[in-house]
Image (cartoon, rainbow, N blue to C red):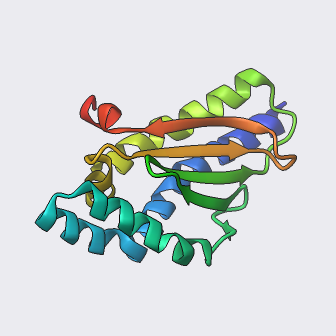
Amino acid sequence: MNNENNTKSKISKAGSLVLILCLALVGKMFGGYLYGVYSDSTTKNIVVDTLYQNLDEIRSNLPMVLDEYTTWEEVDFDGSAMLYSYTVKVSDLNDGDKRALISQIRNANTKPVCENPEIATVINTGIDYRYIYNDLNGSRIGSFVVSREICNGL
């Protein structure tokens, strides 16, 4: 039981860093350009086009091992949301533990996502960021969304 709690604690701490690492990578790849374009033109179409144009560059770096528990597997954009999919090395988590893990990751990362200038530019156009976590078997652990409404409520 103590080993299980230790593993959950490590995963939770690692999960707190996952989105921050992703923010840095995404910001480096196209965020600065996007921020400048949107600031000058305020056109959602330009933001959408920029996101679509840069997906291949991001995908070329995936899958990416973020820490000993988490691998960033996929990124996609469906026109209304950026979709990030991760695999987390967990086993034998019951539904309550899965909800708690996703809650901890969401709580630790929503504010940094909202406060990132490049991502805030995208979110302010109405585009959401969706984060999906699966276990090694491909079963859904949980997911959460960061949206303009959520960021405005912080």
Could you say which quadrant of the image residue 64 lies in?
A: bottom right
Name the residue: 60% across, 71% down.
59
Quick check: 49 left or right of 81? Answer: left
Could you say which quadrant of the image residue 121 lies in?
A: bottom left
Q: Nearer the viewer, residue 114 or 125?
A: 125
Q: Is residue 52 above or below residue 140?
A: below
Quick check: 109 left or right of 41? Answer: right
Q: Nearer the viewer, residue 67 or 152?
A: 152
Hey, which residue is sitting farthest left in the picture?
40
Name the residue: 34% across, 68% down.
31
Name the residue: 55% across, 40% down.
105
Q: Nearer the viewer, residue 123 or 96?
A: 123
Residue 57 at x, y = what percent? 53, 78
Hey, which residue is sitting farthest front in the picture?
45
Number of numbered tags placed on the structure image: 0
Hey, which residue is sitting farthest top in the picture?
96
Residue 63 at x, y = what percent? 69, 68
Name the residue: 24% across, 66% down.
35
Could you say which quadrant of the image residue 51 lies in?
A: bottom left
Quick check: 101 left or right of 110? Answer: right
Residue 76 at x, y = what percent? 57, 58
Q: Dividing the image into 4 quarters, which one contains the C terminus? A: top left
Q: Dividing the image into 4 quarters, which one contains the N terminus? A: top right
